[in-house]
Amino acid sequence: MTDSDRPAGLRYFEDMPVGLVLRSIDYVVAREEVIAFARKWDPQPFHIDEEAARRSVFGGLTACSAHIFSMFSIISQQPLDGSRIVALAGLGFEELQLRKPVYAGDTLYCESTVLDARRSASKPDRGVIAQRAALVNQRGEAAFECRCKVMMQCYTIPEN
């Protein structure tokens, strides 16, 4: 595919240079969503019962870690500029850290910084990027952080 054939609004491997910082859309964590997710996957009282949550070490209704990671997974793929990231596969996550509780009512966004980008030598139609990413709340606090690797589609293929 050449630049002239390239669909608008798509973000390919070549659009993810080292040092690029991407900010996502905002996402409001709904009370009902926190409770429903936790009822199914982590039914601790501080995730499903507002009164118990107020008495807990958190002081309020909080999202469970699996829910936080799930929100990260979707929010991180929705850049604020409206582009769509042409990711082929997630290749792994490292250094997952829950830094602050995520409360019902919080507004989160993801900020990702590209740390490394390399085109595949064996499959030149794809490349791998490494990123440091964080879910940030409305107070500017990183609630969740990780390093991740993503396989991405290239829109140019070098000629041999």
Image (spheres, helix red, strand yellow):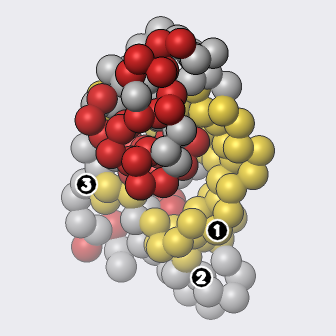
Residue found at x 29% / y 49%: 83
Residue on which disc 1 sits:
91
Instruction: Kindly identify which numbered label has been placed on residue 6.
Output: none
Q: Is residue 36 above or below residue 93?
A: above
At label 1, the amino acid type is: Leu
At label 3, the amino acid type is: Gly
Q: Residue 143's quadrant in the figure?
A: top right
Instruction: Kindly identify which numbered label has been placed on residue 9.
Output: 3
Instruction: Kindly identify which numbered label has been placed on residue 124.
Output: 2
Q: Secondary structure at mark 2?
A: loop
Residue 83 relative to residue 113: left or right = left
Q: Earlier in the sequence, mark 3 or mark 1?
A: 3
At label 2, the amino acid type is: Pro
Residues at marks 2 and 3, CA–CA distance in whole angstroms:
22 Å
Q: How busy is the neighbourhood of tag 2: few (under 14 within 10 Å), some, or many (20 plus)?
A: some
Nearest the viewer among 151 and 16 is 151
Q: Position of residue 120 (x, y in %)?
A: 67, 77
The residue lying furthest to the right in this view is 95
Nearest the viewer among 48 and 132 is 48
Q: Nearer the viewer, mark 3 or mark 1?
A: 1
Residue 115 relative to residue 113: left or right = right
Q: How busy is the neighbourhood of tag 1: few (under 14 within 10 Å), some, or many (20 plus)?
A: few
Does any portion of residue 11 appear in the rendered image? no
Q: Secondary structure at mark 1?
A: strand
Residue 103 relative to residue 117: left or right = left
Q: How busy is the neighbourhood of tag 3: few (under 14 within 10 Å), some, or many (20 plus)?
A: few
Residue found at x 75% / y 51%: 94
